[in-house]
Image (cartoon, rainbow, N blue to C red):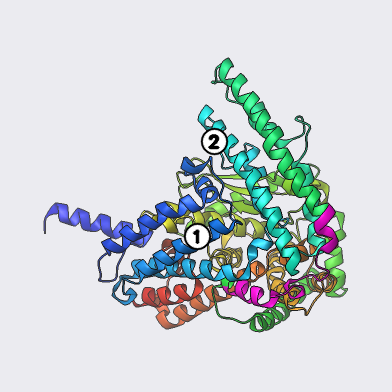
Amino acid sequence: MSKNKIITGILTTIVSLLFGTESYGQTKNQALHQLFERYSIEVLKLDPLGATFQGNHSYDAELANEGASTYTAEKARFNKKYLSLLGNFDPVKLNTADRISFKVLQSILKTDLEKDQYHTEYLPIQQFSSIPLLIGQLGSGNSAQPFKTPADYHKWIARTIAFRTYADTAIANMKKGMAKGIVLSKALVLKVIPQMEELAETDSAKSIFYNPIRNMPKTFSLKERAVLTKKCHHAFQKNLIPAYQRLAVFLKKYYLPVAAKGDGLSAIPTGRAMYDYYVRYYTTTNHSPEEIYQMGLNEVARITTEMEKIKQQIGFSGSLADFFIYLRTDRKFMPFKSPDEVLKAYTDVYEKIKPHLPELFDIQPKAKFEIRRVESFREASQNGPSYMVGSADGKRPGIFYVPVPDATKINVTFLGMEATFIHEAIPGHHYQIALQQENRSLPSFRKNISFSAYTEGWGLYVESLGKQLGCYTDPYQQIGALNNEIHRAIRLVCDVGLHTGKMTREQAVAYMLKHESISEADAVLSAERYMAIPGQALCYTVGELEILRLRDKYSQSLGKNFSLIRFHRALLKQGDMPLDVLDEYMADWAKN
């Protein structure tokens, strides 16, 4: 064998180990990858916001009017076309990596088509995630929409015009929903109204939409600055403010009086069928809501037993409920005086785990990472830190966002600071998502997708590695980690309970207060999150339990040949996927 061939073989093996390009004896299907690339290009035309957040700025001037019937029809034709094209390939004949990508795309297309029958466009806005909130983030100048060149500013101005149309379509769709009884719960509407009112702020000194004007690059000429300032001000006055004002007035004057009195989807017509869809969509399983509800009850019981052990270890003599009150209210668990102190505490967690990462992972992303405070207009409705993915080109870092509405009330125990950082940041979402973006062996369309049960399942799974990462060294952080875990398990009970009519919002709040260390305010925020995003909260524990099941299965079947580092590499190297696809993939992995 020649020296060049030996070197090539070594390099191929290294790349294979790092990014999973091994085909298990079969070659890459070039025709299929050409189809994947065509899909990757065409889908961005239908999702310009997604393109912006991916770092592709070709569509920054556009905003899909997702609620319009013309858009829905165009998206359906698109999905059917690619399903038909996929039908030309036999997945059995594909290598492992191609088979995963085939099934991932197939799942995306089928799920998107199924959604149309439930008319989710009648419920276009809620307080946690919606296009009006995303436009607020983008327009702040501190998110994915760039404001570095005059062309960037012109694109943003064009997007504000498109938002004006979107807002009117959203109002028209909510009116259709009102006629059919498909409306948001009153509790949620009351949270959305002040968000729209804040984004409609007319005072340029207070509005976040003036940030790009205030922070205009100094490299712009005086003429450019004058022209862009005038045009941005005009877009602000004629496009953004009127659109947000119309939304706020409509929600307050017309929508609120007819908002649903119930707290979940069971309170509206077709709500149960819609919820069954969301359960399948978010968990990527065929578990019924009732099965998931029982799963939650079992996990709550198991974790409660572990909490009792920690309580006894600490020497607390009262009940577990009393212990929760102690953890929530004792001032020694609320040591912060400023937002900067809170952010530093998370930085300290990062420094603590750094030395231990190589013990569990032999790959890490190249993408930069930052810890930031949440923007003011989002802060009040956020009940905990979150991760925002960086751009695929690495220019925008992955961001661990921390809400600090009042630093003196941030509690280091029931918040579970160490577990939260591990989950949301490193080695949780930042590792998983950034590695997926950087993986050159994946088709383009797979580098920025997320199946919640896999993504959030991974985040919750790595929380269980806390001790191996140098964390949970004192019982209060241990109880914080358990509290995070039981919080996710409780979601199975409360999410299903709220949307199947088993629970009211008040009963869900009471259940949380009984079984975890959480303030009433945070319990209310959590319940309202489950109400606003049906089924999403299920994916954490469902995904974690599946990863743990696979780990246990292969550690037993492979015995001394099982490696935790290798297992983690396998979970990270092929990107995000539905749980049923993961099951098949790991079976292939274990054979090789």
* Residue 524 left/right relative to 62: right
Pick the quarter of the image with the C terminus.
bottom left
Q: Quadrant of residue 314?
A: bottom right
Residue most toward the left?
A: 1
State how many labels appear: 2
Q: Which residues are magenta?
A: 253-280
Residue 75 has which mark?
A: 1
- Up-down: is 375 above or below 130? above
At numbered mark 2, what does the secondary structure look like: helix, strand or loop?
helix
Pick the quarter of the image with the N terminus.
bottom left
Identified by mark 2, the residue type is Lys
Residue 87 in percent (x, y) is at: 35, 72
* Residue 395 left/right relative to 424: left
Residue 149 has which mark?
A: none
Residue 30 in percent (x, y) is at: 27, 61
Front in this rendered view, residue 40 or 252:
252
Residue 74 forms part of the magenta stretch: no
